[in-house]
Image (cartoon, grey):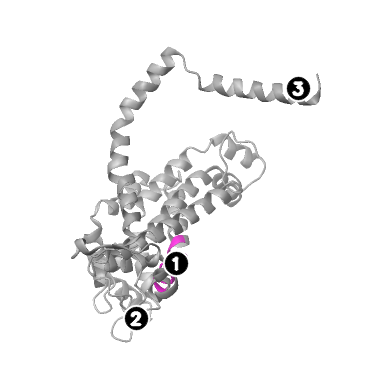
Amino acid sequence: MDMFTEFGAARGGARWSLRAAFRLTGAQRDEAKWGLIFISPWLIGFALFYFAPMIVSFLFSLYDFVLSAPDEARFVGLENWRRMLAEDPNTWEALFVTFKFALISLPIGMVSAFLLAVLLNSKHLLGRNVMRTLFYAPTMVPLIAAILIWSRVLNPQTGWLNQMIEVTGIQAVGMDGLRWLDDPNLIYIAYTFIGLWGIGNAILINLASLQGVPTELYEAASIDGAGWLRQLWSVTIPMVTPVIFYNLVLSVVGLLQYFIVPYVLNGGNGYPEGSTNFYMIYFYKQAFPFQNMGYGATLAWFMFIIGLGITIFLFATGRYWVYYAGESK
């Protein structure tokens, strides 16, 4: 048998193996049929409420479509995309504000949630169950109510945060004090404080992952002379990297969609000095108050592309630092 004959036989064998892999027996076909029936409500819901609206919104981005005059919609092709990318500086300014806030808030939120989970997982912590409940309880407060509460907490005159700082001798109360929600240099820190109020879910997920780390790994590390910090760095963190990665992806997507806090506090007017003119605020203004749905759909799809690109990048780089049990490197 010559080389070409062997190659043809190999290709034929590969095709036969592929067909065999997808050839189902009667029992397997019945199982697949019932599986599809059981997940059909989700599939129908996804098609009607997610996939179809996405297609329609993309079509909107190709039209000059104003909500108040739907009969006057006209096809403009990629004009909305050209305007957004080449002529509208507000798009890039809103993106800059969004990414600037994300670079401040993301590491603080991720590290805080993980360290608090480590604390709540410690066997030396008194009243662990009570402390876990207290840290998770703020997530039960409606977000709007929590934002309004924090607007009072951060009040420069009567807020208890400035009152506590004043005790240390730092001037914090008054017009010359720390104006958290009025100073462009402090506004992102203030918003991060508000975000930390709701990290109970991230703490809970991290806590569950910490409790899943095999105790024999800590025992082996202790026998080798590793201290607490060394065990945290060499055992705990590598074993919970899948959960850290999960929280990272969710946090990035959430920050790209940051909207509710600035909208509730100042109506989305960008105060102070445009530092809170986030991308989703700009999208909302274009799509609804200005009723320019065609341009708003274009902005939405642009953010979808950015979020998808970042997510793909995270998954592509995750294989270098995320460890899955049983995986061979």
Q: Earlier in the sequence, mark 1 or mark 2?
A: 1
What is the spatial separation of the Cα atoms under label 2 and label 3, in whole angstroms?
74 Å
Task: Answer with the quarter of the image where residue 284 lies.
Answer: bottom left
Q: Residues within 10 Å of mark 3 (few under 14, many from 20)?
A: few
Q: Observer-nearest residue: 208 or 7? A: 7
* Nearer mark to the viewer, of 3 and 1: 3
Residue 189 placement: quadrant: bottom left
Residue range highlighted in magenta: 93-106
At label 3, the amino acid type is: Thr
Q: Residues within 10 Å of mark 1 (few under 14, many from 20)?
A: some
Quarter assignment of residue 235: top right
Task: Write down the residue under mark 2.
Answer: 273
Cβ atoms at labels 1 and 2 below 8 Å apart? no
Label 2: which secondary element: loop
132 left or right of 72? right
Residue plotted at (33% across, 60% down): 297
Examine the structure image and report whether residue 5 is included in the region drawn in magenta: no
Task: Tell which of 64 and 206 is nearer to you.
Answer: 64
Asked whether residue 97 is drawn in magenta, I would say yes
Residue 40 coordinates in the image, percent (x, y):
31, 31
SS assignment at label 1: helix
Please name the amino acid that badge 1 sits on: Phe
Q: Is residue 98 left or right of residue 145?
A: right
- How many badges with numbers are in the image? 3
Q: Are discs 2 and 3 less than 8 Å apart at CB?
A: no
Tell me, for residue 5, which label it has, or none.
3
Residue at horizontal 48 percent and vertical 43 percent from the top: 210
Q: In the rendered image, is residue 112 in sight?
A: no
Cα separation, mark 3 vs mark 1, equals 58 Å
Q: How far from the left and from the top, in percent, is residue 138?
A: 28, 54
